[in-house]
């Protein structure tokens, strides 16, 4: 076996870093459709990985297997030293370590912004209401909308809603954040406010897996980029290499399409 | 005012213009308006004339006690008063605390008692009852002021409502000893029985229906099968059949020493029947929740129970309020079917009143009176539902 879940990797500057996510030969079928065809990917703590590829290439499905919103049918996924199996306790333990931000926000429309954020810490982490709301207030300030705490999601703009969704995920103090096309549903003028929050988050050393087509963001923030095509990883590399000298013909083709 | 900033055009019109636009916009419309108007005037005039001059309302006033409580013993009537008092105070406080959502409830409780007070003046028991009713109605108002001033915390109010149901039940049924001797359910009747059947049916069938709806969508095949089978079985059978089953068949299957009285059996039948329909309404609401809501809850690490309790059910139940209130209104009216198994609820009392020799030929009066009572209660329920929908923002996300 190449990379064990807890194996420590010595990097150049002498720090030890750990693979916080390890995926080995992950397969997934939707009925007859083979959507993930042997994904191998390891992510170190603190790394920002941008995943891109054509729609239908399996990139969203892949990051959804990491917190078990989709079940993989072959291969292994280890998150922070715990293997994802059907064991319900493992799934709950892993989910509470992983925050997720969705394309369509998925805020709870019947709860105020403050309640959206403080619900899970109170119910899962068993925090007191005071503590949960205090943290929620801090997070709202961090994503730049402290004055919206008492509003309902429907009263906010798309960009504000997505920032609340990020705050909601961060309230669980996750070690890893998954972003599933976080800006695709936004009007153009709101994309930057969300990317700005994500950039700030990357600066704090958060481990991030981001499915996105925002290549400017990828170039500026990503440590590595992963190109998906037809359920497989075609190419992995630092942004400089992916943009300037992609090794694979398919990568080159796809980039030329989206970068015109 | 600067250019480009125009005030919206005025939309109000005078009464003459309104008439012309809405009632007399063409020759045909004018004709239809006049015809409908004539029919309306004719109906109102005839009904009014009958109600004011010909109708023998003494059938109602003479038997008012029967209509309201059936054979409930007169010397124990204070227990009903006490129950009404609890209801008045609680609904008054609720109106004060929860604001306009529950104000309809308080207003209808107060109005209903004021109405009874007015009717009672003419009856033999007279001014005592009128006074009591007016005091009760006043207590609604006192409660409202107290609630509004924040003298009662929300949580204890909710607990008080939950506790009030068994308390009222014990008050009415008694516990067999001297301060509260048992009053057998065979003497409960009239409006009292109708309301008890409906309230128990609604309060119990709602949680049961929610559980069945969740069961029908459960991932466990056993639970799913049992829930589905129950719902389909009950929905395939008329309520009358279930009432007969509860009344006649159940005692055969139970061991001899276990006796369940007739009213309890009817309550059980109505509850079990209604639960299946609640379940299907709620299932509709559950299906309307986008899967992203559940995914977001799961991604936060919320377990199944918390996801249902805090995310799915609040949204689903809110969206099915109109359907459920409709169901509960028909449940209230369906309680009249227990007359078939010999219980004297409002309609049953009406029939026994009509059997009195001095009431001969007073069908219209009796049925009109019963109809008005049902209408008032059902109308209050649907108004409360609209208020609730507005307060909870149904239809807007």
Image (cartoon, helix red, strand yellow):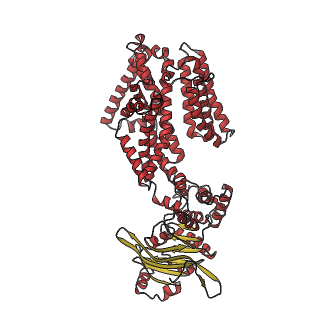
**In the image, is residue B133 above or below residue A85?**
above
The residue lying at 46 percent from left, 59 percent from top is: B291
Q: Left of B361 or right of it: where is A134?
A: right
The residue lying at 66 percent from left, 55 percent from top is: A129
Whether residue A92 is visible, yes or no, is yes
Residue A204 falls in image quadrant: bottom right
Q: How many marks?
A: 0
**In the image, is residue B210 above or below residue B295?**
above
In x, y percent, where is residue B143? Answer: 64, 33
In x, y percent, where is residue B285? Answer: 44, 50
**In the image, is residue A57 above or below residue B190?**
below
In x, y percent, where is residue A254? Answer: 42, 81
In x, y percent, where is residue B146? Answer: 67, 35
The residue lying at 46 percent from left, 50 percent from top is: B214
Q: Of A228 and A243, which appears nearest the observer?
A: A228
Q: Of A34 and A25, which appears nearest the observer?
A: A25
Q: Of B292 and B368, which appears nearest the observer?
A: B292
Whether residue A211 is visible, yes or no, is no
Q: Of B251 and A234, which appears nearest the observer?
A: B251
Residue A250 falls in image quadrant: bottom left
**In the image, is residue A163 above or below residue A218?**
above
């Amino acid at each position: 076996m190449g990379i064990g879940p807890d194996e420590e990797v010595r990097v150049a500057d002498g720090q030890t870093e750990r693979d916080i996510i390890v995926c080995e030969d992950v397969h997934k079928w939707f009925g007859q459709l083979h959507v993930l065809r042997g994904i191998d990917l390891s992510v170190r703590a603190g790394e920002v990985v941008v995943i891109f590829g054509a729609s239908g290439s399996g990139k969203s499905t892949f990051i959804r297997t990491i917190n078990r919103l989709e079940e993989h049918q072959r291969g292994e996924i280890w998150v922070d030293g715990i293997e994802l199996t059907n064991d319900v306790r493992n799934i709950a333990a892993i989910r509470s370590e992983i925050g997720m931000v969705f394309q369509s926000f998925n805020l709870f429309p019947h709860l105020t912004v403050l309640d959206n954020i403080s619900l899970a810490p109170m119910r899962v982490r068993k925090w007191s209401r005071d503590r949960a709301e205090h943290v929620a207030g801090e997070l709202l300030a961090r994503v730049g909308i402290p004055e919206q705490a008492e509003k309902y999601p429907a009263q906010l703009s798309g960009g504000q809603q997505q920032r609340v969704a990020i705050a909601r995920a961060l309230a669980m103090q996750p070690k890893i954040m998954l972003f599933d096309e976080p800006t695709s549903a936004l009007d153009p003028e709101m994309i930057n406010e969300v990317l700005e929050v994500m950039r700030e988050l990357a600066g704090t050393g958060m481990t991030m897996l981001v499915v996105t087509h925002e290549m400017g963001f990828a170039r500026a923030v990503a440590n590595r980029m992963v190109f998906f095509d037809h359920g497989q990883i075609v190419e992995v590399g630092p942004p400089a290499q992916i943009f300037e000298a992609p090794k694979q013909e398919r990568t080159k083709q796809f980039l030329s399409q989206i970068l015109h | 005012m600067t250019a480009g900033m125009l005030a919206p055009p005025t939309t109000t019109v005078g009464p003459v213009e309104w008439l012309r636009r809405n009632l007399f916009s063409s020759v045909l419309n004018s004709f239809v308006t006049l015809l409908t108007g004539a029919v309306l005037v004719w109906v109102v005039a005839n009904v009014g004339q009958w109600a004011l001059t010909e109708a023998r309302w003494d059938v109602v006033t003479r038997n008012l006690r029967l209509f309201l409580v059936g054979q409930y013993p007169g010397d124990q009537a204070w227990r009903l008063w006490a129950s009404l008092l609890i209801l008045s105070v609680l609904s008054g406080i609720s109106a004060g605390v929860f604001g306009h959502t529950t104000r309809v409830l308080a207003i209808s409780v107060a109005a209903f008692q004021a109405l009874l007070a007015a009717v009672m003046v003419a009856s033999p028991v007279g001014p005592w009852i009128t006074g009591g009713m007016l005091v009760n109605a006043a207590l609604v108002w006192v409660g409202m002021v107290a609630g509004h001033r924040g003298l009662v915390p929300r949580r204890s109010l909710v607990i008080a409502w939950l506790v009030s149901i068994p308390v009222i039940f014990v008050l009415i049924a008694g516990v067999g000893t001297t301060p509260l001797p048992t009053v057998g359910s065979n003497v409960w009747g009239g409006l009292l029985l109708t309301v008890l059947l409906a309230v128990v049916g609604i309060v119990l069938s709602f949680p049961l229906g929610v559980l069945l709806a969740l069961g029908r969508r459960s991932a466990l095949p056993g639970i799913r099968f049992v829930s589905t089978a129950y719902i389909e079985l009950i929905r395939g059978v008329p309520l009358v059949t279930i009432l007969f089953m509860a009344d006649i068949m159940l005692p055969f299957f139970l061991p001899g020493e276990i006796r369940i009285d007739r009213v309890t059996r009817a309550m059980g039948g109505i509850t079990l029947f209604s639960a299946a329909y609640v379940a299907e309404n709620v299932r509709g609401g559950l299906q309307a929740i986008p899967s992203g809501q559940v995914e977001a809850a799961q991604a936060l690490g919320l377990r199944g129970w918390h996801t249902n309790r805090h995310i799915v059910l609040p949204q689903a139940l809110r969206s099915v309020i109109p359907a459920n209130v409709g169901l509960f209104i028909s449940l209230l009216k369906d309680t009249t079917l227990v007359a078939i198994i010999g219980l004297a609820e409002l309609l049953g009392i009406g029939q026994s009143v009509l059997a009195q020799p001095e009431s001969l030929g007073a069908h219209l009066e009796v049925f009109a009176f019963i109809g008005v009572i049902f209408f008032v209660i059902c109308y209050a329920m649907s108004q409360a539902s609209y208020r609730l929908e507005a307060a909870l923002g149904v239809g807007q996300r």
